Amino acid sequence: MKTIIIGSDLPAMISKVTFKDAQVFVPMKEEKWRRKRAWVGFGARYLPKPMGLPCHPVRVITHVDYRVPTQKSLDRYKVKSGMELKIPFAEIVGHVLTQWPFTPAAFNKVPRRISIVEQEIHFYDGSSEKYDHLIWTDSLVNLLYATGLDKSSSMETDFPHRPVYVRITMRPPDAPFGNNVMYINYVSDPSIACHRFCDRDGERHYEGLTMMGQIPHKKLIPGIISESKMSRGMVKQLSEMKISCVGRDEVWSSSETLYKTWEKLQAMQEVMECQ
């Protein structure tokens, strides 16, 4: 069975770890992908388990407004960001990626059209690839466009999202915890542009729903996604067509975590081995 993985982020890496014989096609140039690797594990990203990736354990402490959250602070944050926080606030042990795994891949392979009937991917560079099983780890919106399934939906209303702006500074001297702690603090005050910061590895990673002053930013799209009423049906329809959507933006669910993604991949592998 020929398995193809399309994507450039951690879900693609986890997919490759699980399906070792799969081919990886990255829809960006190699030099850009290597720069992106420098952002691995950006911000509050940590894993509950290594999941076959090179990691080191770290203490993780999460607060709202520098303290254990109250219902009032959680409600205030929900109004500010449009998100309901469903995360562990007790001190836990997480695993932080220490390096991006080496992944043999074909770069600058942007899908132009995916023929579901012929199970073939046509790329913008004129090449094409047949597949028996396609693991898609790029945005679900891009997949619907490539397959032509976007005609029945409105991208703006059916897949709502807000871009996130991020920036990195040195960890400030008044940071509440030392370098042995990964500290995540959500900010509920609507007058403050930053909605979350994370202290880790000697740095402070800021995230905001708007620009945060003149310090250089990186804009992440789709950023914060809102639940889509039609995404679940689309993902199910695609799975019946031998296309598995893997990751948060790929299934368009804010509750999707990398660990859930890993569990799904393990289940997929078991099913495929039994076929």
Image (spheres, rainbow, N blue to C red):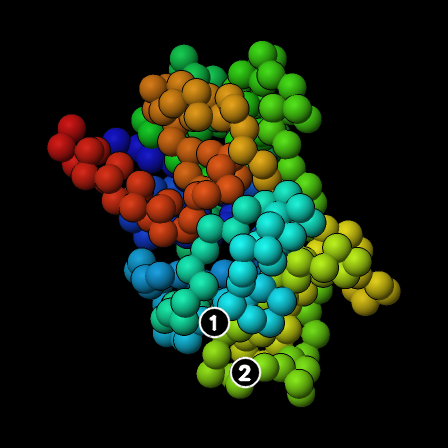
Does residue 74 appear anywhere in the picture? yes
Residues at circles 1 and 2 in contact by the CB criterion of under 8 Å: yes
Is disc 1 placed on a helix, strand or loop? Answer: strand
As drawn, 181 above or below 259: below
Amino acid carrying label 1: it is Ile
Amino acid carrying label 2: it is Phe
- Residue 171 pos. (x, y %): 64, 80
Report whether 101 appears left or right of 188: left
Task: Count how many numbered circles sit on residues in the image.
Answer: 2
As drawn, 103 above or below 15: below
- Residue 245 pos. (x, y %): 42, 33
**Which mark is on residue 177?**
2
Q: Earlier in the sequence, mark 1 or mark 2?
A: 1
Label 1: few (<14), some (14–19) or many (≥20) C-alpha neighbours in 10 Å = many
Does residue 122 appear anywhere in the picture? no
Tell me the residue at 45%/55% (across/down).
87
Q: Quadrant of residue 190?
A: bottom right
Report whether 29 appears left or right of 251: right
Tell me the residue at 40%/18% (across/down).
237
Quadrant showing the C terminus = top left
Label 2: few (<14), some (14–19) or many (≥20) C-alpha neighbours in 10 Å = few
Report whether 264 appears left or right of 9: left
As drawn, 40 above or below 143: below
Report whether 93 appears left or right of 28: left
User: How far apart are the alpha carbons under marks 1 and 2?
Assistant: 9 Å
- Residue 263 pos. (x, y %): 29, 46
Q: Quadrant of residue 271?
A: top left
Q: Nearer the viewer, residue 261 or 71?
A: 71
**Which mark is on residue 61?**
1
Is disc 2 placed on a helix, strand or loop? Answer: loop
